[in-house]
């Protein structure tokens, strides 16, 4: 993405505002979308403060799941997988660089 596209994207995001700016307990679709887009505990707290029973249940279920040993183990495995993928890509890139250097030395 070039700088101009990045700046345009940032301007569009600023115009849109936060998904939590205009939520209320009257629009369930916006509530669910805000819940799925929430990235911080503060955003979850804001949704929870609306005191919509189904949202409270969903947030409580999320909080319960994320402290479970099974969830923590899955997160640990995901972290290892990301590390392994990064290492494999780095190794492949280094191999390609060595191959390119070798070809350049031999005039290929």
Image (cartoon, rainbow, N blue to C red):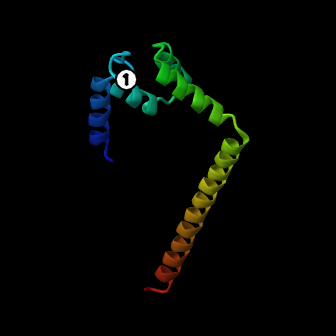
Looking at the rendered structure, the number of numbered marks drawn on it comes to 1
Q: Is residue 3 above or below residue 106?
A: above
Residue receiving disc 1: 18
Q: Is residue 101 left or right of residue 18?
A: right
| Residue name at image x 49 percent, y 19 percent | 53
User: x and y percent of residue 25 in the render?
Assistant: 38, 16
| Residue name at image x 32 percent, y 21 percent | 27
| Residue name at image x 47 percent, y 19 percent | 47
Q: Is residue 28 above or below residue 71?
A: above
Q: Is residue 32 left or right of residue 78?
A: left
Element type where label 1 sits in the image: loop
Q: In this view, does 39 lie to the left or right of 4?
A: right
Which of the 4 image quadrants contains residue 67? top right
Q: In this view, does 31 lie to the left or right of 69?
A: left
User: x and y percent of residue 62 in the render?
Assistant: 58, 32
Depth order, front residue of 53/25: 53
- Name the outermost residue toward the right: 69
Quarter of the picture containing the C terminus is bottom left
User: x and y percent of residue 1 in the render?
Assistant: 33, 47
Q: How crowded is mark 1: few (under 14 residues within 10 Å), some or many (20 or more)?
A: some
Which of the 4 image quadrants contains residue 16? top left
| Residue name at image x 69 percent, y 42 percent | 72
Depth order, front residue of 47/2: 47
User: x and y percent of residue 73 in the render?
Assistant: 70, 47
Depth order, front residue of 100/26: 26
């Amino acid at each position: 993405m070039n700088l101009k596209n990045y700046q345009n994207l940032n301007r569009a995001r600023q115009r849109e505002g936060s998904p939590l700016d205009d939520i209320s307990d009257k629009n369930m679709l916006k509530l669910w979308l805000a819940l799925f887009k929430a990235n911080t505990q503060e955003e979850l707290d804001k949704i929870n403060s609306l005191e919509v029973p189904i949202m409270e249940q969903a947030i409580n279920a999320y909080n319960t799941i994320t402290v479970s040993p099974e969830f923590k183990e899955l997160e640990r495995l995901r972290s290892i997988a990301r590390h392994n993928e990064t290492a494999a890509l780095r190794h492949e890139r280094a191999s390609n660089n060595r191959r390119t250097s070798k070809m350049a030395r031999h005039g290929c």
